[in-house]
Image: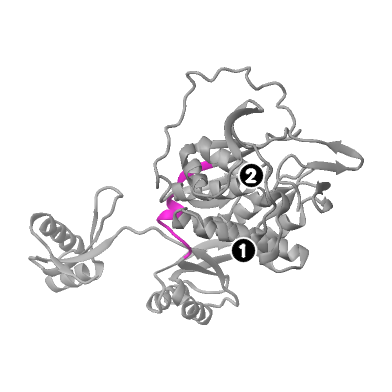
Amino acid sequence: MPEAKGSRLEVAGHHAHGPVADHGHEGKHSHEGAPRLPLLQEGDGRESILFFDAFSGVAGDMTIAGLLDLGVPLLVVERALAALPIEGFHLHRGHAHKNAIVATSFEVHLEAEQPFRNYREIDEMLAKSALSSPVKDLARRIFRTLAESEAMVHQMPVADVHFHEVGAVDAIVDIVGAAAALTFLGAKVVCSPLPMGHGFIKAAHGMLPNPPPAVVHCLKGVPTYAVDVPFELVTPTGAAIVATVAESFERWPTMSPDRVGYGAGHRDLADRPNLLRMVLGKPTLTEVEAGPSTHVLLEANVDDMTGELAAHALTILLEGGALDAWATPVVMKKGRPGLVISALVEAAAERDVTETLLRETTSIGVRRTPASRVERPRRIVSVNTVYGDVRLKISEGPYGPAQVKPEFEDCAARAKEHGVPLREVARAALVKYAGSPPRAEDP
């Protein structure tokens, strides 16, 4: 298994050793009086997105450092580690300058020799520990992800996997500490696609290709991309953490950032700051209110339908389950005038409306686009006017004043009955609604 930190890389005869000094920036800048984010409280991340912006990769210590920089109290990590029967180490939280960005660093300093542990021993230790159930469960899942990846590489039972470097106390600290901090925050985790370095890594098993085999197995189904960096950018612990906790992988999620934290890596990289950026923010309208795709937009181009046939098709589409239907004039190939016949439908009605669209138009194909929509809450009321009963549609919600609209068909019927203009019936209904309690109707 490759070394989680300070690994030695060999690329085309070039040797690079880490960690590398931070270009003398440490200690040169005073941070007294600098603005600081207030500490987060437990559960502050609920209803929020925590975005791992991993443009320089991800490691366990960078994850904890980024969460501490974001505002998770160090005490959260310390209390979790105090619940484990491990000793012979101490923690160091510091800061590092990376391309003029001041980030938090997190290190585990060993005070005594640590034993190698296999997966069975680590899992039993976690299961019997005094960790809270959510932290315990998450830490065990992360180690399980790592163990299954190692088992695939070495073709051996999961329980017997020896972790070597990541079985040492620093990796246990990284995984349990990250599990505690993420549980404390309670946010939905989204991660960016992960950059993959190249070259070779010297590990306990000898020279391994970069990215290491266990990392590749951990990242099954995770989007990755190549970068021209001859270092290990994604460590096994980092890969196991994001593969376990991330609900999705995106370049940047749809969100409004509230606060940002930076976790520093050990090396300096020539083409990018070696940082893991943590962004905590609220999902925006698209993700929160619109939700996943619940509707479908169906469209068909036609250039050989009369206006009468198009109007008839729209009527049939609405009667057949479309929530809305419309025709848009367009210029098609060879300059021919045409129409786009469109219908918005709920997902469950897609098949029926598609068949109607093909049957009632001259198109030989229908395009479909998944869609979602934000709706005002609506209700129907009825008022008694001098012309008779008229229903009104009331659209409310947190979008400004309510919209009140008399039903056209009711107004048309009352106008015909009394021989008055339709607009007079509509006006009477609005006046009645404003001056007396309406009767509720089923929507």
Which residue type carries mark 2? Asp
Magenta range is 279-293
How far from the left and from the top, in percent, is residue 264? 63, 35
Nearest the viewer among 346 and 254 is 254
The residue to which callout 2 is attached is: 170
Position of residue 263 relative to residue 351, above or below, is above
Residue shown at 63% from the left, 62% from the top: 120
What is the x, y in percent for residue 194? 67, 50
* Mark 1: secondary structure: loop
Q: Can residue 427 be seen?
A: yes
From the top left corner, tell me how far across and down residue 199 is, in percent.
84, 47
**Residue 140 located left or right of residue 290:** right
Q: Is residue 286 magenta?
A: yes
Going by the numbered disc 1, the residue's amino acid type is Met
**Label 1, residues with CA under 10 Å away: few <14, some 14-19, many ≥20:** some
Whichever of callouts 2 and 1 sits on the residue coming sooner in the sequence is 2
| Mark 2–mark 1 distance (CA, rounded to whole Å) | 65 Å
Vertical order, 312 against 437 (above or below): below
Image coloring type: one colour
Residue visible at 9% across and 60% down?
Answer: 437
Q: Which residue is drawn at 72% across and 24% down?
A: 23
Give the label on residue 332, or none.
1
Q: Quadrant of residue 39?
A: top left
Residue 334 appears in the rendering:
no
